[in-house]
Amino acid sequence: MSRLITAIQSVATALLRLAEEQGQMVDSQAETAKQQRVTNLIVRSQVEPDQTEKSRLLAEARYRMDAPNRRGLRDHNP
């Protein structure tokens, strides 16, 4: 019986570790997507001939760079 309990504990530990790693991957992907959006806005502003649109694109890029990162529910749990 103790071998069964040990096996169940090992599986539970492995699943917990997997869930934590997947959470970190989601956070990393979200940060990468944010950086790609900002880069896209900056590049678009560099090729935009209209000064008004160029200013708008740069302002949006600045806003997105300064915006706080979104956090998942797991970050709010102690």
Image: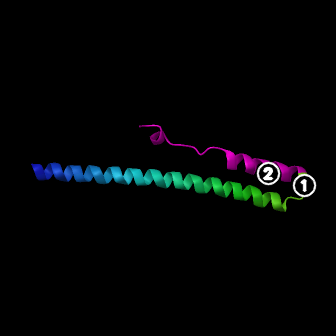
Circle 2 Cα neighbour tier, 10 Å, few/some/many (<14 / 14–19 / ≥20): many
Instruction: Identify residue type, mark 1.
Output: Asp
Is 77 covered by the magenta stretch?
yes
* Three-letter code, disc 2: Leu
Residue 3 drawn at (x, y percent): 12, 53
- Main SS of the magenta part reads helix
Which residue is rendered at x = 27% and y = 49% of the image?
12
Quadrant, the C terminus:
top left
Mark 1 vs mark 2, CA separation in Å: 11 Å
Q: Secondary structure at mark 1?
A: loop
Label placed on residue 57: 2
State the residue at coordinates (89%, 59%).
Answer: 49
Tag shown at residue 50: 1
Residue 34 percent coordinates (x, y): 63, 53
Task: State the image coordinates of residue 36 (x, y, percent, origin top left).
Answer: 66, 58
Tell me, yes or no, whether the two marked residues, 1 and 2, touch with CB atoms within 8 Å.
no
Q: Measured from the top left, where is residue 6 in percent x and y? A: 17, 51
Using the image, tell me which numbered label, if any, was put on residue 14: none
The span shown in magenta is: 52-78
Q: Residues within 10 Å of mark 1 (few under 14, many from 20)?
A: few
